Amino acid sequence: MIFNTSWFLYFFVTFYVLLWLVPNRRLRFYYVLAASAIFHYHFAGPAGITPIIIMAVLVFFLAQWMDRLPHDGASKKRVFTLALLVPILGLIFYKYRVLLLGSLIPCLGGFGQWIKPYAIQPAMPLAISFFTFEFVHYLTDIYHGKGKPVSNPFKFAIFCIFFPSIVSGPIKRFEPFLKQLENGLERPLVQMAALGLAQVLLGFFKKLVIADNATLLIHLLEKRTDLSFGPVCLLMSLLSIRILFDFSGYSDIAIGLGRMIGLDLPQNFNFPYIARNITDFWRRWHMSLSSWIRDYIYIPMGGSRNGPLRKFINLLTTMFICGLWHGANWHFGIWGIYHGLGLTLHHTWEKTPVRQKWAAWGPSRWIDIALTNIFVAYGWLLFFYPMDEVAKITRYLFRF
């Protein structure tokens, strides 16, 4: 995690002391933008920062061009398609090239040797998954008339590289974020800064004390060769603890840093392990991502508007993309399909007559929570391990 490096500690303390000394809102805005550029350059270097600059410039000007075209015209749709290809092809090239070409090589026989030299991982731009989703959201909202393109390139730049959220989110929406910067950046209120600092400290506690110690125990369990039902259940529980406190801790740090600067970032977690079903879980887990995939993948594909079969296909496709977004490996996609099947089963269950009687039964709430957590906990095996390892752990799970 970048936030727990000594460089970042020195960087942020120096940055924050000077922030309070900057005399006016306009200069404060440019100061935060400059600090974000320094942060990004330090952790990404020239090879990592150049692609985001190129993509950001193209997206900025294509959005301006698209907004000038007639709303219902074919030309606007063509420009929109071209603009979307900029971040999407960039993401495929930098993150998924090795996965896709590496999967093709065995299928092509002798021809696979021709593409083998291209199946090499290029230098990965910092946080390409996050800024790709933010670019897609920005272009889509401009195309559908839900917002006007940002005319100030410096404001668009700070939306792209605001350093607390650049690495692991939360995924921002451009209008609520930039609305806070209409007249520059106000000096943060003392109360807001104090709340932000408390959230940052909570995030570090989650990450360094809970998640990292859970990781140590997981590594001890992974070394055992005599796993059975009990240790595997413990492993699944520790994986659930690790990913929740690691990721929500990171989000707390990012949101808290934003508050200390004077900017609100979207909430990302809302006690996901008290969810009564898998749909409720995704309303509480990585909320900025789950709302993004709903608004920009699931609903544009048709959502639930075209019958149960199409809804089932849309759910599986959406969650497969969501899974692959987390990492360039097929087991992430399988994890997404697993959750897509869970969402489909839950939506089907909601329409049955038995469901109403079940909900009226007193203990059903606690059983629902327990079953949801078991489903999610097994899914973390698919998330963290390749499929052969998951199959081995699953066999251990039934070794009483």
Image (cartoon, rainbow, N blue to C red):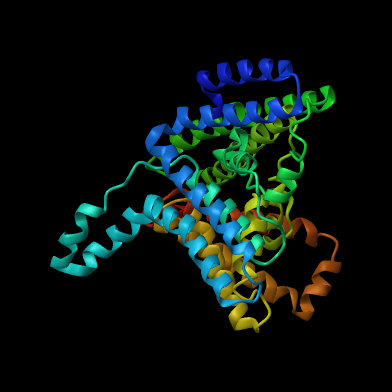
Judge by depth and name the residue closer to the eye, 206 or 59: 59
Which is more toward the observer, 88 or 73? 73
Residue positioned most to the left: 110
Q: Count the marks.
A: 0
Q: Is residue 179 above or below residue 206?
A: below
Work out whether residue 225 or residue 112 is closer to the camera in this orientation and state it: 112
Q: Quadrant of residue 180?
A: top right
Q: Residue at x 82, y 74 (%)?
A: 356
Locate residue 301, reporting x and y percent.
59, 73
Residue 98 picture location, percent across and down: 32, 53
The answer to whether residue 236 shows anywhere in this view is: yes
Which residue is rendered at x = 26% and y = 53% of the image?
Answer: 119
Tell me the residue at 59%/82% (across/down): 309
Side of 390 relative to 141 (left or right): left
In the rendered structure, the answer to whether residue 174 lies left or right of residue 50 reads: right
Residue 35 locus on image (x, y percent):
58, 26
Q: Is residue 126 above or below residue 326?
A: above
Farthest front residue?
68
Q: Residue at x 64, y 26 (%)?
A: 31
Residue situated in front as seen by the camera: 62 or 17: 62
Q: Position of residue 179 (x, y in %)?
A: 76, 44
Q: Eyeballing the image, is 394 above or below 212?
A: below
Residue 1 in view in this figure:
no
